[in-house]
Amino acid sequence: MIQRLIQQISEDLNIEIEIVDTETAAEAANLIKTGQIDFIADCICDFSWAATMNMAPTQAYLQLEYVPVSRRGSNIDNLKKVACATDLLYTKNFVFSRYTEDNRVYADSLEECFKIVSEGRADILFAPRSEVPYLIEETGSYNLEVALESDFADELSLGVYTGEDRRLWRILNKEVNHLDISKIRNSVNEDISTTSHRFSPQWLIYHYPLRAMAIMALIVALIAAAVWYRFYIRRKHTQVIHHMAYTDSRYNLPNIMWLIREAPKTYNNLDEDDKCYIVNFELDKVKDNDFIYERDLLDKQLKNMAEQLDQMDWVLLTSTSNEVGGLVCLCKAQNNMEITRLAKESIRKFGYLQTKDSKIWINLKSGISEVDTNDLQQSIQKAQAACSESQNDVRFFDSELQKELEFVQKVESHMEAALNNNEFQVWYQTEYDIKTRKPIGAEAFVRWQSSELGFLRPDKFLRVFERNGFMIVLDYFVLDEVCKLQRLRLDNNKEVVPIAVNQSRLHINEENYLNKVKSIIKKYKLPKHLIKLEFSEAAFESLNQPEQQERVKSIIRNLQNMGVYISVDNFGSGYSSYKLLDSLSIDEMKIDRSILNSNNVTKRKRDILDNIIKLGKFLNMNVICEGIETEEQEQLLLELGCRYGQGFLMSNVELEMDTNNA
């Protein structure tokens, strides 16, 4: 209000007025008394008092009405103590005359008076009606209420300094006479309206309690909704994480972690007569079923098997295995014989794919172990180990299997040290001309003279090495030994013949395989065709995949460019024989011993052997038959046109290799 008043005077008189703000009325009185300011804008129109302050009041421009303010609900008759600001004129003029010294509580400002009454240290105060809303808001004294009627009034005027020229007083007095009082009153009302509607939570509760309660209820509801939504989202995310943790994504079935979690709840409630078992079912990976049948068809079969097993009384829980194509079941039975019978029945029931017109049998097998409630994880591992060792049937984890696995662990724990200590020995078996009985080559075999395990033949350790990948390292060792022998014989002017070195099927997918072979052959500077690399027929089982077929073709072609003969071992023992003949350029065919070795070579088997030999010759391949043990077998091969052989019958043919013959 004061600023608007000064602005109007400045505009009317066309002068610039500097406004000096003070914290208290006493500070303003001291400034005017000492002549540091020219006039006070809100001076009480009291001439006698003004004279003591070295100022003269102009005519009044506004009347201030003072209203009593007390705590809400106070009894009027008990309002004995008054809060009063000592530096305000109306305190002396009106308050002192009504209240004795004992009933006065002094304060330095009106704001402090409001706090004193609000806190109960005084009962009443008097304040200008126009300032009450602001002061209540400023001090947060919402427990105070204002009387409707004014108690007394003061007039406001301009207090002009009288120490110098009194013309300023006449000018301002005249200006006050011409002021638009309606504008000043409107200004006061606007200030009151603005101040009284300044928003705050306390103001809202004070003026609109019902609305305040509604807003608070809305806020609480929003907070509750936010908390609920967060809880809902968190629960939803937890469910997703839970599903990911305990569900196999390929089959959308519970996984082995779920089974481990749920199993204790189940087997703790079994009858005393029942034993608890882990039964592991698995599609045999040796046949690479995913390459034969559609993956979706196998997945559908395994899922259907899981659903049906879950409905059987003897199956308590069913989950997927950690391996693709496997199921792990928690089962009950009265003894080992019963659970074995039930597992075999399941293999017969689910061991085939049902197509529209027929059944296609698949290689399903099972492993069983009795549950150790103190270590369920180990029980599962035992069942899986038994399944791994099973041959298209059911195998129980027993003491015999335990010994086998312990032997495997010993083999794996000693294999690297054995290589470093030269415990692996390379032996040779002669490939010979059946008609002349002269050697035409040899095949390298590895034996293990272990310092810990004794003498071991290949069937004791090669399958372990194939599984753990150590076969790759051992193959390079044998190749290096053979190349070293060939180099030694060349340097000593001894007869040399091609020596075959077996290669694991793991090499087909080995990175940098060609460079490693090349570096070994190059190290010994061998002429071409003194090294044969023998791959078993099983190494080429994935030739029906276009990308893999191109990779194998590239490997064979590059090896032949190095001057290496390529031989296919165990030809005729698998289903990919003719596929690889069609896809690959092979130098030599070794007919599998199973075709020749028989107590009675039937006409049908003779015809099969005859056609294989003719096929090899037609494709310009060197044909050797393995497993010759009798002279009758030699005669049969000569009759069928096979000139070369290998086997126990002629294993002692002299090669003068300065080494043992197997």
Image (cartoon, rainbow, N blue to C red):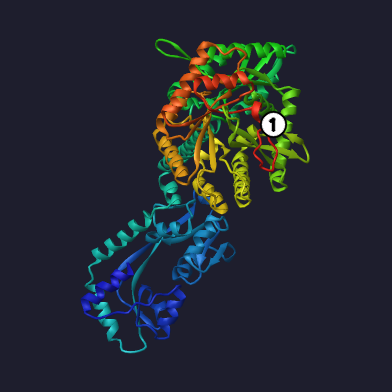
Callout 1: 10 Å neighbours few (<14), some, many (20+)? some
Name of the residue lying farthest toward the front = 436
Instruction: Give the total of numbered labels.
Output: 1
Amino acid type of disc 1? Lys
Relative side of 198 to 454, left or right:
left
In the rendered image, is residue 371 in sight? Answer: yes
Kindly identify which residue carries mark 1.
460
Q: Nearer the viewer, residue 347 or 612?
A: 612
> Image point 39% across, 11% down: which residue?
356
Rendered view: 493 above or below 618? below
Q: Quadrant of the C terminus?
A: top right
In the rendered image, is residue 254 in sight? Answer: no
Rendered view: 259 above or below 12? above
Q: Nearer the viewer, residue 226 or 376?
A: 376
Relative side of 599 to 271, left or right:
left
Rendered view: 492 above or below 134? above
